[in-house]
Every structure is written in structure tokens, then in C-alpha cells.
Amino acid sequence: MGHEQHHHRRARKRLIARIVLVLGTAISVVGLACFIYLAHVQAICSPTNSDILSPEAWWTPDIEDCTMGRSTIEQYQRFDALVIISGVMIVLGAWVVLSRARRRTKRLIIAGELSVVVLVIVYAALLYSVR
């Protein structure tokens, strides 16, 4: 009876880890897609798209996102970077549960992940303190 309960508990734990792994991957992919899109918009809307002989932009895009402004786009990109890092942390945490690595290796990965958590907290604090 005890062995059966342990097996079900472990199977449930692995199922939850798989779900968290998929969610973390989705979070990272969405954050990366937003980051890439905003980088593209910033490149298109940048005043550096000008003719060599004139200081004016020779082509003004017909994109409504160009009205956001450079600082707003950069702020969104910082937030997207935070989302990507958080998604990677979630994926690493789920991977530790799912991996068949030895206990010592898992402890090392968890210690590394804790250092990444501290870095994300510091990054988020700096991100929202500098406005």
C-alpha cells in the first residue's frame, strides 16, 4: 500500500512538472516574440532610416506602433526580457524535477537557479526604480 501511494505521488509530481515545463516554455516564447517584434518596430521607426544626404527620414512607416516612442518601446523590451528570464527559470525548475540526474547534480542546478532568482529580483528592482 505504501509503495503504491509513493508511486502515485511521484507520478502526480512529474505530471505537474511537465505542465509547468510547457507553461514556462510558452511564457519564454511569447516574451521572445514580443521582444523581437518591438526590436523590429524600433528599427523601422528609427530616425536612422534616412538618406545619406538628408537628415530627414526618407521613409516613414505606416505603422501605428511608431507613435509609441522610443522610450516606451525600450521599457516594454526590458519587461519582455524579465518575462523571458522568468520563463527560463520556470523551465529549469521543472527540468530539475523531470531529470534523472543524481541528487548532487540536482542540488547544484537548484543552487544555480537560486542565484538566477536573485539576479532577476535585482534586475526587476533596478528596472522599476529607474523610470
Image (cartoon, helix red, strand yellow):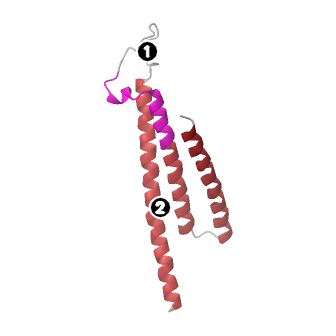
Whether 65 is among the magenta residues is yes
Q: Which range is magenta?
A: 61-80
Q: Which of the two residues, 67 or 101, is positioned nearer the viewer here?
A: 67
Q: Is the Cβ of the residue at disc 1 closer than 8 Å to that at disc 2?
A: no
Helix, strand or loop for disc 2: helix
Q: Which mark is residue 113?
A: none
82 versus 111 height, above or below: above
The x, y position of residue 62, in whole percent, is 31, 24
Say if 97 sits above or below 50 in the image: below
- Residue at (34%, 23%) from the top-left corner? 61
Cα separation between marks 1 and 2 = 45 Å
Secondary structure predominantly adopted by residues drawn in magenta: helix
- Note whether 57 is above or below 107 in the view shown: above
Residue 89 x, y percent position in the rendering: 55, 55
Figure quadrant of residue 56: top left
Q: Inspect the image, locate mark 1, and give the three-letter code of the amino acid beneath it.
A: Ser
Upstream in the sequence, badge 1 or badge 2?
2
Residue on which disc 2 sits: 21
Mark 2 is on which residue type? Answer: Leu
Q: Is residue 68 left or right of residue 97?
A: left
Residue 80 % position (x, y): 47, 43
Dot 1: within a 10 Å radius of its alpha carbon, few (fewer than 14), some, or many (20 or more) residues? Answer: some
The residue drawn where x is 50% and y is 53% is 87
What numbered label is drawn on residue 50?
1
Q: Is residue 73 magenta?
A: yes
